[in-house]
Image (spheres, helix red, strand yellow):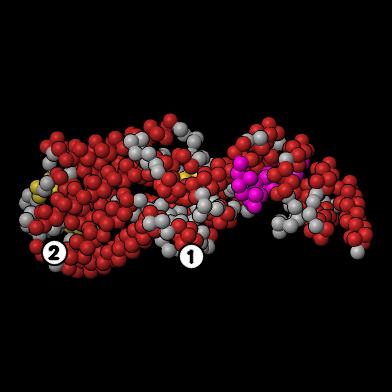
Amino acid sequence: MDCTNHVSGELYGIGIRLGLYLHWAALLILRASGRGSWSTLSRIRMSVNLISCMIFSKLVSDIVHSRSLSLDFLITFYLIVVLFYPDGYNLYRQSNGERRSGYRYTLLPDIPLILYNLICLAVSVLGAWFWLKGIHHTEPTSCSAKAAFFGVFDLYDHRWRSFATAWAILSVVFFFILLMIHTFEYWSENGKKVEKYDLARRRGVHCGLPFPSIPAMSRGFLRPRVPRIIARFKWKKPYARRIVILALRVTHWLFINFIPPLAAIISAERMIHANQLNVGALSDSAGQILVLIMGIANMISLLWEIARRPNKPYEDPLAAYMYHCHSSSPCDRDEASQILRELLRSYINYDPIVRLDARKHPLESLFRTALMEQSRKSIIDAAGHGDLSTVNEILASQKTRDYHQHSPDVKIPRSALNFAASYGHVEVVKRLLEDEMTVLAWHPLDNYHCGPLYSAAQKGHSVVVELLLEKFWGNLDGRRKEVECALGAIEDNTPGHSEARRLLEAYRDGLDKEKLDIV
């Protein structure tokens, strides 16, 4: 018996499927690599939305005119919802390339993401109706209809229909919640509710879902980072424990990023094959050709963009402007403020938003903070490696001077002094201590006891200890507390550093004498 079923290629023909698979691969590359521009991400998402709307409209039209097969909805659901499920809630992050001291840029909800949530919600609502009633209003197939979820089974099986109905209802709830969260976040950001929104973002919600602000959850259970295999084993022990952790992280990442899409691809292809669905030739449908061209073009443009700048993840706030702005429509002040807030919100060491004078000069303050964070990371790296020329260049920068003048409470060069003192780079320490910003930033009153003096004493760099003591300032109790902390480092960790101990003890005795004289 011939079980061939002739269906329209506009719904899930080979061109439609290949085009969607290429879009999924492009989004996976963007999510996994952390490269590519945000304008590219928005363009690919809008392409997916356009194709999904076309397929959904065709499906609804076929159902209304009683032309739809009983298989059409499930294949459509796989291609629209399940295939792109990981992109329905992922707010992509870009890193500036530094593993610990770098900050990450978080892409907040935008129109393409909200539109996709709306499309998925509409498809899920249709699915709940379809499995409850609509399946009886579709045309039967030539032979027994086969569904697939990796494996193949009867579409009308009672257990499968119960599962599919529950799945559709849960999908409605899930995408409704996502739509509300992303719409509220988008409206809050564009509705100028800055103070309330900044406070919420500082609590660690970075993935668009209401996760608590704890490290494991703020990274996102549903959006894990790509595991770093080399970094997991570099200079670290025990290896057995790290192998187990790495295996769990790889499994987690593969499960989130590959299981739903692979389920969609395998199940859709098996249903088409098992039910002998004839979707017609690619050349017979202009819609299939158009979708395939869109998929190929988006993939090529993404790969070309990555190939042009393979080692340049976003390092400055201006790189994000393409997300909101185009050459024909420049950013205004409100849009620029929004973009810069997005960039600065995920900073690891501290949140610069707390330190901004956002009420008086929001845009200028955000620019200064963004530019200064780059300089801060560069000077820390240069100080740790003893790169005196780079340190001189950064300290001489007018941007650095201007920033410190407007934000004197932000202790920019302190960490650089810590690194230089710890590694014993005498010339770099001298240069940093010649700079007024460093001297003002380093004092015992800022609750950062055991700073550069501790680092130098612990490593036995007596020359650095002497240089630091010459520039030491603050009240007597604060200075004495840090000297005692440094002495404790020598006694506990590095006995025998006699010169550093002698300098510290002499300075402590001088402080005690000075205190007695005051009394």
Residue 172 visible in image: yes
Q: Which mark is residue 134?
A: 2
Residue at numbered disc 1: 212
Which is nearer the N-term, disc 2 or disc 1? 2
- For the image shown, how many numbered marks are present on the structure? 2
Which residue lies at the image location 55% right of the left edge and 52% below the top edge?
A: 356
**What is the quadrant of residue 230 in the picture?**
top right
Three-letter amino acid code at disc 1? Pro
Q: What residue lies at 66% left-to-right and 37% top-to-bottom?
A: 395
Magenta span has 460?
A: no
For the point 19% across and 69% down, the residue is 158
* Label 2: which secondary element: helix
- Residue nearest the viewer, comparing 514 with 295: 514
Coordinates of residue 3 in the picture (x, y in percent):
9, 51
Can residue 299 be seen in the rendering of this structure?
Answer: no
Rendering quarter of residue 482: bottom right
Question: In the rendering, at what x and y percent does residue 54 appear?
Answer: 19, 48
Q: Is residue 71 above or below residue 98?
A: below
Q: Residue at x 18, y 65 (%)?
A: 129
In the figure, is residue 143 to the left or right of 314? left
Dot 1: element: loop
Q: Position of residue 103 (x, y in %)?
A: 54, 48
In the picture, which quadrant includes the C terminus?
Answer: bottom right
Magenta-span inclusion, residue 413: yes
Numbered label attached to residue 243: none
Q: Which residues are magenta?
A: 402-425
* Disc 2 residue type (three-letter): Gly
In the rendered structure, the answer to whether residue 401 lies left or right of residue 318 reads: right
- In this rendered view, identify the residue nearer to me: 92 or 160: 92
Disc 2 residue crowd, few under 14, some 14–19, many 20+, Cα 10 Å: some
Distance in Å between CA atoms under marks 2 and 1: 40 Å
Q: Nearer the viewer, residue 386 or 390?
A: 390
